[in-house]
Every structure is written in structure tokens, then in C-alpha cells.
Image: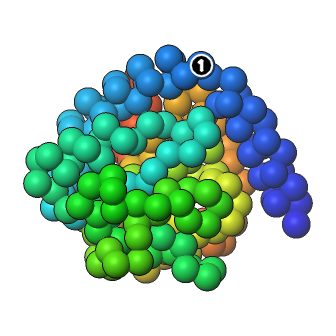
Amino acid sequence: MEDNTKKDSLRNLLLEKRDNTSFDLLKIASQKMQKKLKKIYAFKNAKKIGVYYPIQSEIFTQDIIQELISDGKDVFLPKVTGEEMEFRKIRDFSSLEKGRFDIMEPKDDCPTDNNLDVILVPTVGISPDGVRLGYGHGFYDRFLVGSNATTIALTLEKQIVKNIPKSDHDVTIDWIVTEDRFFQTQK
């Protein structure tokens, strides 16, 4: 229980920090991350890529999604079904609608495929060794337990924290991409 209290207060602090980032700065940081992603072999060579649609002050992924579709990659976005999450293929942004938590999700007629090569994971905070702090609902951790996909966190440099309490169910992330650098975690 103490870990959850620590995680909650850290989550609130990091969200406040991220929410105080200007739109222009987020846009510039997102563009820099998009360029850095292409330097990661697993991302560059992936055929099927899972991407999240951003909410609030998350890193903007719309340009990444558009570029992947233009490059002929198969792009999948998460859809929450009950307590689980699955990835569904989209053709373009018209394949999306508002879903649970008011997040843009693939429509019901989009085909499901959870066997992805790479997944970009939304992140509130992360430690250099890949312990990720999300929103606390556990959807990504539950999904990633059964996945062999390479995971990449897109996050602002200021969201990297030396230590994040790790729970048994937390899945560590393979790569971290910020506006300044990208690196493989020391799992």
C-alpha cells in the first residue's frame, strides 16, 4: 500500500510538471522525438506499430501516426474493452472515435491484432532503468505482460525520475525517447 501512496504522489507531481509545459514546447519536443524514433532499429524496421493518441499534455503522436500510415506501416491504437486493452488497426484518423476516458480509440469495425512489433507507451514518468509510471489503471501493464513487442516510452526529459517504486505487475520499458536523447534501458 505504501508503494501506491508513493506512486500517487509522484504521479501527481509529475503530471503537474508536465501540464505546466507550454503547447509550443510540447510540439517542438514531439517533433524532436519523432526524428529520434527513426534512429531506433526496432522502430525503423517494424511493420506493425502500436501508438497511443495523446490526451492533455502527453507527447503529440498525431504526426508520427500520419507518417507511419504514409510509409505503409500497419498502425494500431489501443481500445479499452472492460478491464483489458487491445490494439486495433486504423486506416487514418477517420477510423477513430471518442472512447472510454474520452480518449480517441479505433472504431469497433477496426480489425484487432495484438501481435505487434513495437508499441509506443504513454508515460507520466519513467526511471532510467525502464520502470514506468502511468495513470494507475494498469491497462498497459496487463497488456504488455503477454506481448513480445519492443516498448518505447516517449517522455519529456524532466519526466525521468531516478527512482519509481516498482510493483510486481509493472512491466519495464525497453527504450526511452526524450527531446534531448534516446537510450535503451538497463533492464
Residue 118 in view of the camera: no
Question: Is 158 placed above or below 49 here?
Answer: above
At numbered mark 1, what does the secondary structure look like: helix, strand or loop?
loop
Quadrant hosting residue 87: bottom left
Question: Residue 170 placed where, x, y %?
Answer: 60, 66
Residue sitting nearer the eye, 95 or 171: 95
From this view, report whether residue 177 is shown above or below residue 131.
above
- Residue occupying the point 45% across, 51% down: 53
Compared with 164, 182 (above or below) is: above
Q: Is residue 150 left or right of residue 71?
A: right
Position of 129 with respect to 8 (left or right) is: left
Amino acid type, callout 1: Ser
Is residue 111 visible in the rendered structure shown here? yes
Q: Residues within 10 Å of mark 1 (few under 14, many from 20)?
A: few
Q: Nearer the viewer, residue 69 or 130?
A: 69
Percent across and percent down for residue 51 are 37, 55
Residue 64 percent across, percent down from the top left: 30, 41
Q: Relative to the observer, which residue lies in front, 3 or 114?
A: 114
Residue picked out by circle 1: 22
The quarter of the image holding the N terminus is bottom right
Point 34% across, 78% down: residue: 109
